[in-house]
Amino acid sequence: MNRRQEVQKGFSLIELLIVVTIILIIAAIAIPNLMRSKMTANEAAAVEALRTLNSTALMYSTTYGGFPHAISDMGPASGSPNPSSSAADLIDSVLATGIKSGYKFTYTVVASDPSGNVLSYAIAASPVTPGTTGQRSFFTDQSGTIRASANGVADASSTPIG
């Protein structure tokens, strides 16, 4: 048998380049959709976290006579198994840090009485990296209404969400 009669095994360089090109085209279509779905999931998680913070702030106020002074006050204690006003153990330790699912949660005391009891609060949730971890920002307060803004920081005048 001479060399001209040998059967070629494997793929040619042209065939491999065509396959790589097809894979790159599919990736160019799929990756933006994946990023968009991740941002949507982060936004949904942020809204759910705000709902959680509102309900736990209400539980906190019935137990301790006022709303918490900070998000961390609703979190777990770092050494003591007993809940207290500075570590009520009502939310998980990740949310208590103020950053979760690509969003940063900023808790602000709006009003307090002369004894220092918090009467009202506001919580803003903004994407850690706008356009990557989320597109919209969110706002809530002791009323429980969650508001959203696609342009900048959400506040009490932003559009309520369902």
Image (cartoon, grey):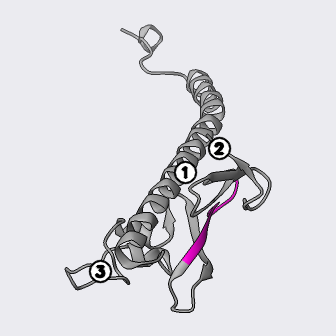
| 125 drawn magenta | yes
Residue 3, relative to residue 130: is it above or below? above
The CA distance from mark 2 to mark 1 is 9 Å
Q: Are marks 2 and 1 in contact (CB under 8 Å)?
A: yes
| 39 drawn magenta | no
Identify the residue position indicated by label 1 in the image: 47
Identify the residue at image location x=39%, y=73%. 74
Residue 87 quadrant: bottom left
Residue 121 quadrant: bottom right
Q: What element does badge 2 sit on?
A: loop
- Image depth: mark 2 or mark 1 in front: 2
Q: Earlier in the sequence, mark 3 or mark 1?
A: 1
Q: Earlier in the sequence, mark 2 or mark 3?
A: 3
Judged from this view, the residue extending furthest toward the front is 114
The CA distance from mark 2 to mark 3 is 33 Å
Residue 77 is marked as 3
Callout 2: few (<14), some (14-19), or many (20+) C-alpha neighbours within 10 Å? Answer: few
Identify the residue position indicated by label 2 in the image: 161
Q: Nearer the viewer, residue 30 or 140?
A: 140
Per the picture, the main secondary structure of the magenta-coloured stretch is strand
Q: Nearer the viewer, residue 28 or 79?
A: 79
The CA distance from mark 3 to mark 1 is 25 Å
Number of on-image labels: 3
Magenta range is 119-131
Q: What element does badge 3 sit on?
A: loop
64 vs 34, left or right, is: left
> Residue 16, how many percent across, how many down?
55, 26
Identify the residue at image location x=61%, y=53%. 145
Identify the residue at image location x=37%, y=73%. 75
> Residue 57, how many percent across, how many down?
45, 67
Callout 1: few (<14), some (14-19), or many (20+) C-alpha neighbours within 10 Å? Answer: many
